[in-house]
Image (spheres, grey):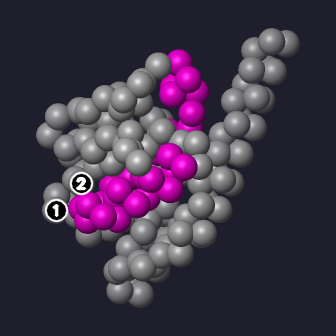
Amino acid sequence: MTRRMSIVDDEVASPAGRGPSRRNRPLLYVVDDDEATRELLCAVAEDAGWEALGFSRLAPLRDALSARSPTLLILDDDLPDGRGGDLARELRADPGMRNVPLLVCTGAQPMRVAEIGAWAPVVAKPFDLEQIDRFLTSTAHRAADERSERSIGQAG
């Protein structure tokens, strides 16, 4: 089976078949420098009905965030060009991004996990795919509820 996932690094890659139906799907950005982990998380998300974009570094992620906010952002902490947990702290301080749901998947030491936990939920690596799937499902439901509330407010 061929995956439609895009990996975004130095250049922006367009997911295959981008169109209105893909645009209405919840959007996940996955940032992990381990290719297998990144692909696994994107595949789980796509199987659950998400559009998933993968990044191996923070720099291209920042570019993507300036273009389009995701429904959910999953970050590794230890990346080649920075710390995902530090980005989580920055995003929580940014009024335009503070409400984007975040999940940090990391193999960091307990002290670092506790520090990151002040800004975002943390899942330890190796993680349980069922836990990731539950997080995707609950985030998608919340996003759908918010879209529904906005459309009701606009109609009235």
Q: In the displayed orientation, state which residue is furthest to the front.
A: 1
Vertical arrangement, residue 154 with respect to residue 71, above or below: above
Horizontally, residue 33 falls left or right of residue 114, namely left
Residue at the spot x=48%, y=39% of the render?
A: 51
Residue at the spot x=50%, y=46% of the render?
A: 46
Residue 54, given in percent of the width and then of the height, sits at 33, 48
Badge 1, how many Cα within 10 Å: few under 14, some, many 20+? few
Give the amino acid type for the residue marked by disc 2 in the picture.
Answer: Ser
Q: Are marks 1 and 2 in contact (CB under 8 Å)?
A: yes
Q: CA distance from mark 1 to mark 2?
A: 8 Å
Mark 2 sits on what residue?
Answer: 56
Q: In the displayed orientation, state which residue is furthest to the bottom.
A: 110
Vertical arrangement, residue 40 with respect to residue 124, above or below: above
Horizontally, residue 42 falls left or right of residue 58, namely right
Horizontally, residue 78 falls left or right of residue 107, namely left
Residue 154, given in percent of the width and then of the height, sits at 75, 15
What quarter of the picture does the C terminus occupy? top right
Q: In the displayed orientation, state which residue is furthest to the top.
A: 155
Q: Which residues are magenta?
A: 20-47
Give the amino acid type for the residue marked by disc 1 in the picture.
Answer: Pro
Mark 1 sits on what residue?
Answer: 80
Magenta stretch encompasses residue 34: yes
Camera-nearest residue between 101 and 6: 6
Horizontally, residue 119 falls left or right of residue 136, namely left
The quadrant holding residue 78 is: bottom left
- Predominant secondary structure, magenta span: helix
